[in-house]
Protein backbone atom coordinates (compact mmCIF):
# COMPACT_ATOMS: atom_id res chain seq x y z
CA UNK A 1 0.00 0.00 0.00
CA UNK A 2 2.86 2.35 0.88
CA UNK A 3 4.50 1.71 -2.51
CA UNK A 4 1.22 2.55 -4.28
CA UNK A 5 1.07 5.90 -2.42
CA UNK A 6 4.62 6.73 -3.45
CA UNK A 7 3.89 5.74 -7.04
CA UNK A 8 0.81 7.99 -7.15
CA UNK A 9 2.70 10.93 -5.65
CA UNK A 10 5.53 10.41 -8.12
CA UNK A 11 3.08 10.17 -11.03
CA UNK A 12 1.29 13.37 -9.94
CA UNK A 13 4.64 15.16 -9.67
CA UNK A 14 5.66 14.08 -13.17
CA UNK A 15 2.29 15.14 -14.59
CA UNK A 16 2.57 18.50 -12.88
CA UNK A 17 6.05 19.09 -14.29
CA UNK A 18 4.97 18.04 -17.79
CA UNK A 19 1.87 20.25 -17.62
CA UNK A 20 3.75 23.32 -16.38
CA UNK A 21 6.49 22.84 -18.97
CA UNK A 22 3.94 22.63 -21.76
CA UNK A 23 2.03 25.77 -20.84
CA UNK A 24 2.10 28.54 -23.40
CA UNK A 25 3.10 31.80 -21.81
CA UNK A 26 3.04 35.35 -23.06
CA UNK A 27 6.46 36.79 -23.63
CA UNK A 28 7.54 39.45 -21.18
CA UNK A 29 8.47 42.06 -23.71
CA UNK A 30 7.41 45.39 -22.26
CA UNK A 31 4.09 45.55 -24.07
CA UNK A 32 0.72 45.93 -22.46
CA UNK A 33 -0.36 46.93 -18.97
CA UNK A 34 2.49 47.58 -16.59
CA UNK A 35 5.05 46.73 -19.25
CA UNK A 36 7.00 49.91 -18.66
CA UNK A 37 6.95 51.12 -22.25
CA UNK A 38 4.74 54.19 -22.42
CA UNK A 39 2.43 54.42 -25.37
CA UNK A 40 3.04 50.94 -26.74
CA UNK A 41 0.07 48.66 -27.36
CA UNK A 42 -0.03 45.06 -26.26
CA UNK A 43 -0.93 41.67 -27.49
CA UNK A 44 -4.48 40.99 -28.67
CA UNK A 45 -6.73 41.01 -25.64
CA UNK A 46 -4.62 43.50 -23.70
CA UNK A 47 -6.90 46.33 -24.88
CA UNK A 48 -4.15 48.91 -24.71
CA UNK A 49 -3.96 51.36 -27.57
CA UNK A 50 -2.49 54.80 -27.76
CA UNK A 51 -3.07 58.02 -29.56
CA UNK A 52 0.34 59.36 -28.68
CA UNK A 53 -1.00 60.71 -25.38
CA UNK A 54 -0.93 57.52 -23.32
CA UNK A 55 -2.95 54.33 -22.83
CA UNK A 56 -6.59 54.19 -23.89
CA UNK A 57 -9.14 51.42 -24.02
CA UNK A 58 -9.78 49.52 -27.24
CA UNK A 59 -12.56 50.37 -29.65
CA UNK A 60 -15.90 48.76 -29.00
CA UNK A 61 -17.14 46.76 -31.93
CA UNK A 62 -15.89 44.19 -34.34
CA UNK A 63 -13.16 44.15 -36.92
CA UNK A 64 -14.53 44.64 -40.41
CA UNK A 65 -13.20 44.02 -43.88
CA UNK A 66 -10.95 46.72 -45.22
CA UNK A 67 -7.59 45.69 -46.53
CA UNK A 68 -5.02 48.39 -47.22
CA UNK A 69 -1.45 48.09 -48.40
CA UNK A 70 1.13 48.50 -45.67
CA UNK A 71 3.20 51.68 -45.66
CA UNK A 72 6.86 50.68 -45.89
CA UNK A 73 9.73 52.51 -44.19
CA UNK A 74 13.45 52.87 -44.72
CA UNK A 75 15.86 51.27 -42.25
CA UNK A 76 15.80 52.98 -38.83
CA UNK A 77 13.30 55.59 -40.04
CA UNK A 78 9.79 56.73 -39.22
CA UNK A 79 9.66 59.16 -42.16
CA UNK A 80 6.92 58.49 -44.69
CA UNK A 81 8.57 58.42 -48.10
CA UNK A 82 6.85 60.15 -51.04
CA UNK A 83 6.17 56.87 -52.92
CA UNK A 84 4.29 55.49 -49.85
CA UNK A 85 1.94 58.44 -49.31
CA UNK A 86 -0.72 57.26 -51.77
CA UNK A 87 -1.39 54.33 -49.42
CA UNK A 88 -2.31 56.71 -46.62
CA UNK A 89 -4.41 58.76 -49.02
CA UNK A 90 -6.42 55.60 -49.78
CA UNK A 91 -6.99 54.98 -46.07
CA UNK A 92 -8.11 58.60 -45.61
CA UNK A 93 -10.48 58.40 -48.59
CA UNK A 94 -12.00 55.20 -47.20
CA UNK A 95 -12.46 56.81 -43.78
CA UNK A 96 -14.12 59.88 -45.33
CA UNK A 97 -16.56 57.60 -47.21
CA UNK A 98 -17.22 55.59 -44.04
CA UNK A 99 -17.56 57.98 -41.09
CA UNK A 100 -18.59 55.18 -38.69
CA UNK A 101 -15.26 53.36 -38.93
CA UNK A 102 -12.11 53.82 -36.90
CA UNK A 103 -8.60 52.67 -37.72
CA UNK A 104 -5.88 51.15 -35.59
CA UNK A 105 -2.44 51.92 -37.03
CA UNK A 106 0.07 49.21 -36.18
CA UNK A 107 3.80 49.89 -36.32
CA UNK A 108 6.28 47.12 -37.14
CA UNK A 109 10.04 46.82 -37.57
CA UNK A 110 12.54 44.32 -38.90
CA UNK A 111 14.39 42.01 -36.53
CA UNK A 112 17.49 44.16 -36.13
CA UNK A 113 17.78 46.14 -32.91
CA UNK A 114 16.76 45.49 -29.32
CA UNK A 115 13.18 44.69 -28.38
CA UNK A 116 12.77 48.04 -26.59
CA UNK A 117 14.23 49.98 -29.51
CA UNK A 118 12.03 48.18 -32.04
CA UNK A 119 8.88 48.76 -29.99
CA UNK A 120 9.76 52.45 -29.83
CA UNK A 121 10.51 52.63 -33.57
CA UNK A 122 7.28 50.77 -34.36
CA UNK A 123 5.38 53.30 -32.27
CA UNK A 124 7.04 56.23 -34.06
CA UNK A 125 6.05 54.69 -37.41
CA UNK A 126 2.44 54.23 -36.32
CA UNK A 127 2.35 57.80 -34.96
CA UNK A 128 3.83 59.16 -38.21
CA UNK A 129 1.11 57.42 -40.24
CA UNK A 130 -1.52 58.70 -37.81
CA UNK A 131 -0.20 62.26 -38.08
CA UNK A 132 -0.25 62.04 -41.86
CA UNK A 133 -3.88 60.87 -41.80
CA UNK A 134 -4.79 63.74 -39.48
CA UNK A 135 -3.08 66.10 -41.93
CA UNK A 136 -5.38 64.68 -44.62
CA UNK A 137 -8.40 65.73 -42.55
CA UNK A 138 -9.16 62.58 -40.55
CA UNK A 139 -10.28 63.24 -36.96
CA UNK A 140 -7.60 62.00 -34.58
CA UNK A 141 -10.22 60.49 -32.27
CA UNK A 142 -10.88 57.91 -35.00
CA UNK A 143 -7.23 56.78 -35.07
CA UNK A 144 -5.41 54.67 -32.51
CA UNK A 145 -1.86 53.34 -32.62
CA UNK A 146 0.00 50.36 -31.33
CA UNK A 147 3.44 48.89 -31.85
CA UNK A 148 4.52 45.30 -32.25
CA UNK A 149 8.15 46.07 -33.03
CA UNK A 150 9.68 42.98 -34.64
CA UNK A 151 7.22 40.55 -33.00
CA UNK A 152 4.94 40.03 -36.03
CA UNK A 153 7.02 39.73 -39.19
CA UNK A 154 5.36 39.16 -42.56
CA UNK A 155 8.61 37.89 -44.08
CA UNK A 156 10.81 35.45 -42.18
CA UNK A 157 14.13 35.73 -44.02
CA UNK A 158 17.26 37.29 -42.60
CA UNK A 159 18.06 39.47 -45.60
CA UNK A 160 17.26 42.92 -46.97
CA UNK A 161 14.16 41.79 -48.89
CA UNK A 162 12.57 40.29 -45.76
CA UNK A 163 13.62 43.24 -43.61
CA UNK A 164 12.15 45.70 -46.16
CA UNK A 165 8.75 43.99 -45.98
CA UNK A 166 8.75 43.98 -42.17
CA UNK A 167 9.48 47.72 -41.79
CA UNK A 168 5.85 48.82 -42.07
CA UNK A 169 2.68 50.31 -40.69
CA UNK A 170 -0.55 48.37 -41.16
CA UNK A 171 -4.18 49.43 -40.77
CA UNK A 172 -6.97 47.61 -38.93
CA UNK A 173 -10.45 48.94 -39.64
CA UNK A 174 -13.02 48.72 -36.84
CA UNK A 175 -16.57 49.94 -36.30
Image: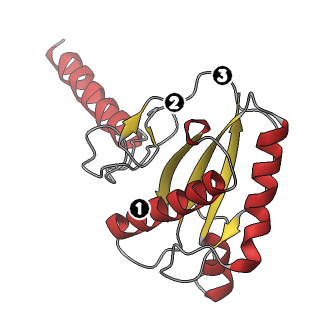
Please tell me how crowded label 2 is: few (under 14), some (14-19), or many (20+) other residues with Cα within 10 Å. Answer: some
In percent of width and height, residue 64 lies at 77, 33
Query: On the rendered image, what quadrant is the C terminus found in?
Result: top right
Lateral position of residue 41 relative to residue 128, left or right:
left
The image's mark for residue 132 is none
Location of mark 1 (residue): 119
Look at mark 3 in the image and give the residue it sits on: 61
Percent x, y of residue 81: 66, 78
Name the residue nearer the viewer: 52 or 162. 52
Which numbered marker is on residue 58? Answer: 2
Q: Height in image: 7 above or below 123? A: above
**In terms of sequence position, does the residue under pointer 1 or pointer 2 come before the other?**
2
> Taking the image as drawn, is residue 66 in sight?
no
- Which of 82/43 is in front? 82
Q: Alpha-carbon distance for marks 1 and 3?
A: 26 Å
Q: How is the image coloured?
A: secondary structure
The quarter of the displayed image where residue 48 is located: top left
Residue 152 found in image quarter? bottom right
Give the image quarter of residue 101: top right
Amino acid sequence: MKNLKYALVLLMGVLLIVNVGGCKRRPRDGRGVGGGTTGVGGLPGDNIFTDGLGPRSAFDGEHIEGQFEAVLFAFDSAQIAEPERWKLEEVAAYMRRNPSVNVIVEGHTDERGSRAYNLSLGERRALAARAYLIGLGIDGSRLQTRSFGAERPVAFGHNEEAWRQNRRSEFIVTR
